[in-house]
Image: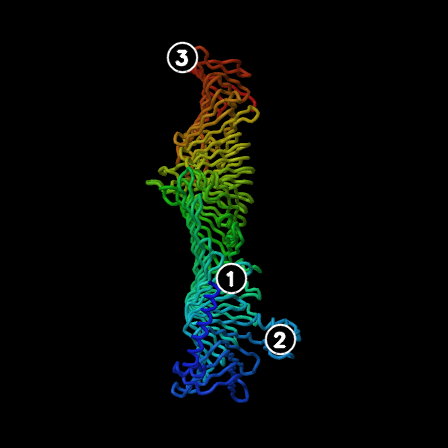
Amino acid sequence: MVLAAGVLLIVALVAFLAIGKWKHPFNARDLPKKLGLDIQQEANGWTYTHGSRGHTLYKIHASRLVQLSSGKGGRVLLHDVKIELYSVDGSRVDHIDGKEFEYDPEAETAKATGPVEITLMRPGVAPAIAPNATPQALGDKAKGKPLAAVAQTAASGEIHVKTIGLLFDQKSGVATTSQHVEFSMAQGAGSAMGASYDSQQGLLVLNQSVQLNTQRGTEAVLLHAYHAEFERESQICRLHAAVVDYRGGKATAGEAKILFRTDGSAVRLDATSGFALATATGSRLNAPTGAIDFDDHNQPQHGHLEGGVQMDSASQSAKGSRQIHGSAPTAELEFTAKGELRHAHLERGVTLDSNETSQSQAGPLRISRNWRSPVADMEFHSAARGRLEPGTLHGTGGVVVTTNSQRGKEAPVPARMAADEVTGAFGQGSTLTAMTGVGHAEIEQTTASGSRLTTNGDRLEAHFAAGQEAGTKNATQIQSAIVDGHVVLVENPAAKTGEASAPLRATAGHAVYEGAGEWLHLTLNPRVEDGGLQLTADKIDVSQDSGDAFGHGNVKATWAENSADQTGRARKAKQGNSNGLGGQGPAHAIAAEAQLHQSTGEATFRGHARLWQQANSISAPVILLDRQKQTLVARSTVAAEPVRAVLVSAAGTESSKTPGKDAAGKPATPSVIRMRGGDLKYSDAERKAVMHGGTAGTVVAETGTATSVSNEVELTLLPAGNHAGKDGTAAQVDRMTARGRVTVSSEGRRGTGEQLVYSSESGEYVLTGTAAAPPHMTDPARGVVSGEALIFHSRDDSVSIEGGVHKTATETTAPR
């Protein structure tokens, strides 16, 4: 039953179709009329050729042509269309292929009604359209390759464009579309909205929303542009509002022009109306105009920026942050074979500013630096994770680098470095680690005490502490520095209310600075001038924090006239203040080592030290001179090297009626007092010097007429402005007093007692004792004499003895 029903159904269908065909016969030729097309004629294999001046400009091929009625404007439908566009010299053929075009003979236009593909050939490549076709020259490629190789070579330089709604104008040879466009070429593939192609001019225009995906080595590069134009003959591509994304970075240009080689690789990029480069690490480089040259692998080789170049970089880490900004009117860029930036040359006024913040236990540390130079060269290197960091920075033509460092809420500490040429070296994380200045090098700093320090030299090399190290409490921003050639150091103490301050000045041939202790080590004929003090030695160490100076080896020091302005000390000038040993002339000192304290005005000399002022002198293992208190201390720790002093004793002129003569009428010439003992203390305010036996045991004092041995000796100098200093002569001894177990020898006599007083004015020696032990004197001619006081008159060789209420005199004569 099922089979029978199926056969019956088939028979019914056949009968139904036969009846319909008989009543309404089907004619395919009547279909266009029923659709209102009014076809007039049909043809197969239609070709239209257009030429000018003997040259073919384009050909239109169609596998089938359908002529529409005149009521429709005489238009023609073309099937399987291929439009061949020829260059003037016939060296290339472009193709436009589509399934169906509507051709308007009156308007001489052909409009595609479906998808269209345009094939644009590379200039310099002959189309492989004949068996004997051979390619033209392509750079360094050989000629005469087989046909397959020719076709492959030609195809490698083709541009393929796919779109819909294409309109081809026979009069102008321009094909346009307002629809979505897709294109592909050797550089990559992309898309746009709307396009036009001028076959005669060889100009391809992508109207808007241009996008190109390409490769640079193994990296993907994405290009966006609002508008693009490609000139076939000149191989130039113009872009408007172009943006290129690569390796996390970005490049932008208001207007860009790219020149290509015949093999499709880029030759040069010219950017105007703003050009910028941004990296994935936060660095940015921009300028109004720029140009980049490329090699045949599309890798940049050289770049030129001008019109005001701006450079910015920012980084953030757990240790802190860093921002860098630079500017210059022009910049030249050099790249490696892999297209990585390696060198930047900046000219006509370069400015670089950096701000760095780091954290430590001592609190946040902020360091800002400013670089100024007419010309600068920066070298770059690759760091971890593909980061590009600066390696060195070299400036010429006069470079100035200023620095401000601030820890917590403390006041900023300024510093300045300048030289004819400066080279900066960068470490990990773009941290400035070293800086070298050559030619008129100068560095200015403010020490922890507030003093302002300036160092000059022919060459200066400074090393900076890393951010973490610089953040420690006692560290400074300069870790170490070396200065060579004509070194000059000037330190101006911090100004204090009511105090006069004079600078400390040092010179040398070589200087080394240690930032940890703020020490400056001077060698090669170093010299330090601190107010009225001048110091030379084989090596001098200067503390930039305290201003103290230490001399080592062959120390020589000189003091000029003292005043508050000259010494720069916190004290008032005193009329007639002496310098060293009570005199007014310059004082000198030599020693193996010396130590100068700027804050206290103390100068300590060690190792066979000797200090002298005109005829007065002191020698000892250690001599301490306090220029504020106007005191001097000399001491010895071994008996073999006692303290020695040589001082001038005033001649007795007061009792003489004849100027320049003594009481006996002889010339009044000063005598000399020589002493040696364990230590010596001198006070200029008291005009008094005291020497103790100390390690030497006793004090030995020698005059021109007597020698005494005692526990101590006290010398009293004449008042300032009396005999001393009025005419620049040395300070003179007015009185000498020896105390404690005194023994005196003179002219063969020998006396003992507890005190001996010598007066330089009268020339008398007065020897006294105690009630239990009166003084004694042994005379070779008279024997032993004693009394309450024994007086020896050196000018007439007489001795007076005083005892009780009686006074007796014994005259003795002894050979000289």
Farthest residue, direction top: 772
Residue 755 occupies which quadrant of the picture?
top left
Q: Report whether 234 appears left or right of 402.
A: right
Q: Is residue 170 visible in this depiction of the protein?
A: yes
Identify residue type, mark 2: Ala
SS for callout 2:
loop
For residue 588, the mark is: none
**Residue underneath mark 3:** 804
Of pointers 1 and 2, the one earlier in the residue sequence? 2
**Residue underneath mark 2:** 137
Mark 2 neighbour class, 10 Å CA radius: few under 14, some 14 to 19, many 20 or more: some
**Of residues 666 and 510, the one drawn nearer to the viewer in this rendering:** 510
Q: How many marks?
A: 3
Is the residue 701 above or below the residue 53 in the image? above
The residues bearing labels 3 and 2 have C-alpha atoms spaced at a distance of 139 Å
Identify residue type, mark 3: Gly
Identify residue type, mark 1: Leu
Residue 409 occupies which quadrant of the picture?
top left
Residue 354 location in percent, x, y? 43, 51
Is the residue 633 above or below the residue 73 in the image? above
Residue at 52% x, 45% y: name it. 511
The residues bearing labels 1 and 3 have C-alpha atoms spaced at a distance of 108 Å
**Residue underneath mark 1:** 333
SS for callout 1:
strand
* In front: label 1 or label 2: 2
**Of residues 402 and 498, the one drawn nearer to the viewer in this rendering:** 402
In contact (CB < 8 Å): disc 3 and disc 2: no
Farthest residue, direction left: 498
**Of residues 705 and 26, the one drawn nearer to the viewer in this rendering:** 26
What kind of colouring is applied to the model shown?
A: rainbow
